[in-house]
Image: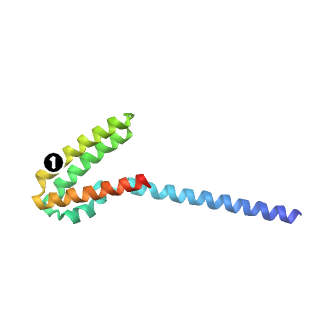
Amino acid sequence: MKNVKIIFATLLFLIMFSINLNAQTQENQLPKVKNMDPPQKVNNTRLQIGITPEQQKPYDAIVIKYAGKFEELKASTSTKEEKLKAFTGLQSDKNAEVKKLLTEDQYKIYLRVQEERKEKVQRRIIQ
């Protein structure tokens, strides 16, 4: 009986240790993504749009500017309706700035990519 208790205690310890180790691994991975520079996050979008080297710095500046504003809005204590209204306004402002920078064809692609992301988020919410 004593051997069963020792085996049970050992198994319990190993399970608790593996759960704790898994949680620490996940915590260590999250900040890496969170602290990534916005330009790194949008590199794929830049490639899809076809941003030229001359457009890259101004485009990244716009993205960084609005990323900060969106984060502030997300962290605010406003109601969902207020946040949605503010988000829509910020997105319109961002789109206006991006439109001035991009060519007509690039802007169409930008809007298409934006719409695809919106649909993806909506699908995630529904599921």
Question: In x, y percent, where is residue 79?
Answer: 38, 34
* Closer to us: 77 or 58: 77
Which image quarter is the C terminus in?
bottom left
- Determine which quarter of the picture holds residue 80: top left
Q: Is residue 81 left or right of residue 46?
A: right
Q: What residue type is labelled 1?
A: Glu
* Closer to us: 10 or 103: 103
Q: Is residue 72 left or right of residue 105?
A: right
Question: In x, y percent, where is residue 14?
Answer: 69, 62
Q: Residue furthest right?
A: 1
Residue occupying the point 34% across, 36% down? 81
Residue occupying the point 59% across, 60% down? 21
Residue for badge 1 = 97
Image height check: is 44 above or below 59? below
- Determine which quarter of the picture holds residue 110: bottom left
> Is residue 1 something that shows in the picture?
yes
Element at badge 1?
helix
Which image quarter is the N terminus in?
bottom right
> Is residue 103 something that shows in the picture?
no
Question: In x, y percent, where is residue 122?
Answer: 36, 53
Image height check: is 64 above or below 106? above
